[in-house]
């Protein structure tokens, strides 16, 4: 039975919803305190999400109707989710509505909640956002079990969006939904799904150590937490040996199977919708996940064979060709300049993106420019990874280090406001000045620039009359701000 909350007579807008959502962000001081205390997510995170779901009218068992494909990993989970969603959309005669939940967003928060590849509309986002908001205001929890969940309290930013995604997909009657894990898996707010149709783990690496642990084994344990009894799990070849061993153990604990997907030979001759040679691995994982989901819903007679030489159904090829995923190995032409954009922000992803850029432009005679930022991770280590991957095949003539502030006015686009970075550090350009110093050491011949905002960096580059290749990387927040400036959406 589908649950509908009473319609609200309200004039609240999408911008009202974004403002309310931003109020749920944790500030920088709180986040640093949690990191320093070593306090990590635990089972209470899942119990809270179950309770928040009850308060908006659903039990977590209701979400089985969404026929979820659940995906985690360190590198490539977002691309895998996009590929999987696109394949499933090719079966629209049987599955007219495919939901996709991912994070973070680039331009606008609505991108996190998509139906048939399109972000939910502003009107629907606002409508559903305040239905959930008002429902939480008008319901209560047992203070013995949840002493902090008093009437009117709300989950944090990511939890709220996860809750909202379930509500939207249920209200919209989605037939199948692809969920990308936020962080980890075991205690991630998406992990209230009880019976996913398939689970996937993209390439593992070291990231979010303050939440997941310092070793590949601890990280793999967290990622394997999405495995469920009877829900087949799939992963990619070439996982770190220690991490793969833990994934196998987790699958056994959860009474399910874990299979390593092949790299499908047929995809070597396919121009995948997301650029980059490494995307064939993510496309192969998506093929296995979509195949399992379709078979479990009786829409494929049998899953695609786990064989590199297996022939893939035409809808699978079409789905992989038509996948669109901005900010990942994306090329844009503006006037005489070519922009190469990738929001890579881990060691593995920055090396993969840098290799893509190098292989694409190394025979070009154009001037080459880098725009880089990473505000919260070890930015200097990432910059060194980038340098080691690209040099000496490609050398940058100019390098720009900017904050993630969108506009010259000093303001962020409302969808890109982030309270979890140090305002003082941003205003003093501490990270950017240190990165400029680091780059001058790595390559003394390059000209370095520090800008207080993304708009200024773009303007300085575009003042040049000659054709330039520009590589933008280090942060999805940077890439999102760049795309907003390109769109001219100064709000």
Image (cartoon, rainbow, N blue to C red):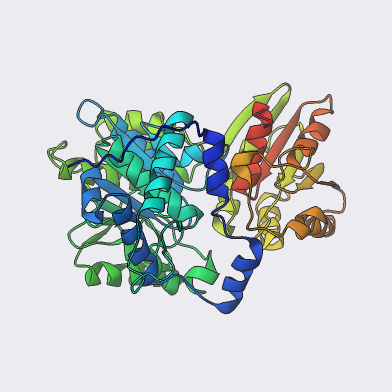
Q: How many marks?
A: 0
- In the image, is 460 to the left or to the right of 470? right
Q: Quadrant of the C terminus?
A: top right
Q: Residue at x 33, y 72 (%)?
A: 145
As drawn, the residue found furthest toward the bottom would be 37
Would you identify the image quadrant in which residue 455 lies?
top right
Q: Which residue is nearer to you in this view: 37 or 183?
A: 37
- Is residue 40 positioned above or below 259 on the image? below
**Residue 116 horizontal/vertical position (percent):** 36, 31
Residue at 69%, 31% in the rendered image: 490
- In the rendered image, the quadrant that contains the N terminus is top left
Q: Left or right of 264: which side holds 393? A: right
Image location of residue 229, percent across then percent down: 19, 63
Tell me what residue is drawn at x 31 percent, y 58 percent: 192
Closest to the observer: 272 or 169? 169
Residue 197 visible, this angle: no
The image shows residue 331 at horizontal and vertical percentages of 60, 32
Q: Position of residue 459 (x, y in %)?
A: 80, 32
Q: Is residue 36 above or below residue 204?
A: below
Q: Nearer the viewer, residue 421 or 255?
A: 421
Residue 218 in sight in this render = yes
């Amino acid at each position: 039975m589908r649950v509908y909350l009473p319609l609200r007579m309200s004039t609240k807008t999408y911008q009202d919803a974004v403002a309310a959502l931003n109020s749920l962000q944790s500030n920088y001081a709180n986040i640093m305190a949690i990191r320093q205390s070593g306090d990590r997510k635990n089972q209470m995170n899942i119990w809270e999400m179950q309770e928040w779901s009850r308060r908006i009218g659903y039990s977590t068992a209701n979400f089985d109707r969404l026929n979820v494909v659940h995906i985690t990993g360190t590198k490539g989970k977002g691309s895998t989710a996009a590929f999987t969603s696109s394949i499933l959309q090719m079966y629209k005669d049987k599955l007219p509505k495919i939901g996709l939940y991912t994070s973070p967003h680039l331009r606008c928060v609505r991108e996190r909640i998509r139906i048939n590849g399109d972000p939910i509309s502003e009107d629907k986002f606002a409508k559903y956002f305040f239905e959930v908001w008002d429902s939480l205001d008008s319901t209560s929890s047992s203070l013995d079990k949840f002493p902090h969940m008093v009437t009117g309290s709300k989950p944090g930013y990511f939890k709220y969006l996860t809750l909202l995604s379930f509500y939207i997909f249920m209200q919209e009657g989605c037939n199948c939904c692809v969920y990308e894990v936020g962080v980890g898996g075991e205690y991630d707010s998406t992990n209230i799904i009880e019976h996913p149709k398939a689970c996937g783990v993209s390439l593992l690496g070291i990231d979010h150590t303050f939440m997941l642990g310092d070793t590949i084994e601890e990280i793999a344990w967290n990622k394997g937490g999405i495995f469920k009894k009877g829900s087949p799990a799939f992963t990619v070849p070439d996982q770190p040996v220690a991490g793969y061993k833990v994934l196998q153990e987790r699958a056994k604990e959860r009474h399910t199977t874990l299979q390593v997907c092949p790299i499908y030979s047929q995809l070597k001759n396919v121009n995948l919708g997301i650029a980059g040679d490494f995307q064939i691995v993510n496309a192969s994982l998506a093929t296995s996940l979509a195949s399992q989901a379709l078979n479990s819903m009786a829409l494929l007679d049998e899953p695609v064979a786990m064989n590199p030489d297996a022939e893939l159904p035409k809808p699978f090829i079409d789905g992989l060709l038509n996948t669109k995923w901005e900010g990942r190995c994306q090329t844009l032409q503006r006037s005489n300049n070519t922009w190469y954009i990738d929001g890579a922000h881990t060691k593995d992803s920055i090396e993969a993106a840098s290799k893509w850029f190098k292989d694409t432009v190394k025979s070009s005679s154009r001037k080459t420019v880098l725009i880089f930022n990473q505000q919260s991770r070890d930015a200097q280590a990432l910059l060194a990874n980038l340098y080691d991957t690209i040099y000496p095949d490609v050398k940058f003539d100019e390098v720009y280090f900017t904050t993630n502030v969108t506009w010259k006015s000093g303001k962020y686009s409302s969808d890109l406001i982030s309270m979890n970075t140090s305002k003082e550090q941003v205003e003093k350009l501490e990270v950017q000045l240190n990165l400029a110093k680091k780059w001058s050491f790595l390559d003394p011949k390059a000209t370095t620039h520090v800008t207080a905002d993304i708009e200024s960096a773009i303007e300085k580059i575009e003042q040049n009359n000659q054709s330039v290749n520009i590589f933008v990387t280090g942060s999805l927040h940077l890439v999102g701000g760049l795309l907003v400036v390109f769109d001219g959406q100064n709000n």
